[in-house]
Image (cartoon, rainbow, N blue to C red):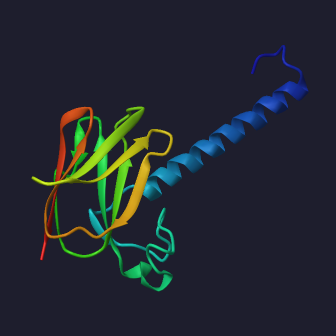
Amino acid sequence: MPQHLSAKKRVGVLIASAVVLSLSGLVLGARAWRAPARSTRTMPEIVKATSASVVPQRRRADIQAELITIVPHGFEPLKLTRPRGRFLLMIDNRSGLETVTLRLTLEGGPRVREMRVPREQPDWSEVVDLEVGRYVLSEANHSDWVCVITITR
């Protein structure tokens, strides 16, 4: 440290540095904890962003989740196949874009859902129960960003 700083200022700088390092460690740890292990998994007792009116408390542990990540070149995975039934659709916006506008459309049919996912709140999730068919998840401003979701019997 520079010699011209007083002892009080040096202590303040050291404390501020320690706080910044601690917060950085917490952020990195939270990101590592949040990182997906697999596309399909059973959710724990508490399901993020799902109200009790949508999923009863006693059933939350039985719901599976499908994670789709938006990266700078599109969606990962590009395809998803699962049996009919309720599941938690989780979308993580890691594209770096300010906001992404997502559209879920039944192939050859109507739009099922449209949602905006801002960079400030990059994780979106909702319990869905889609009918048998092929659905296209797309981003409004990137026509080549497509994830096909197939729901089987």
Q: Residue at x 25, y 76 (%)?
A: 85
> In the drawing, does residue 87 fall left or right of residue 60?
left
> In the drawing, does residue 27 fall left or right of residue 147?
right
Q: Give percent across and percent down for residue 125.
A: 40, 59
* Quarter of the image with the C terminus in it: bottom left
Q: Residue at x 18, y 50 (%)?
A: 147
Outermost residue, left side:
108
Q: In the rendered image, which quarter is residue 41 located in?
A: bottom left
Residue 75 vs 99, above or below: the answer is below
User: Quick one: 41 or 124, which is closer to the camera?
Assistant: 124
Q: In the rendered image, which quarter is residue 38 located in?
A: bottom left
Outermost residue, bottom side:
58
Q: Give percent across and percent down for residue 96.
A: 38, 34
Q: Give percent across and percent down for residue 19.
A: 71, 41
> In the drawing, does residue 10 fall left or right of residue 31?
right
User: Quick one: 31 or 145, which is closer to the camera?
Assistant: 145
* Quarter of the image with the N terminus in it: top right
Residue 85 vs 134, above or below: the answer is below
Q: Residue at x 26, y 62 (%)?
A: 39
Q: Residue at x 50, y 81 (%)?
A: 57
Residue 131 vs 117, above or below: the answer is below
> In the drawing, does residue 9 fall left or right of residue 125?
right
User: Quick one: 151 or 24, which is closer to the camera?
Assistant: 151
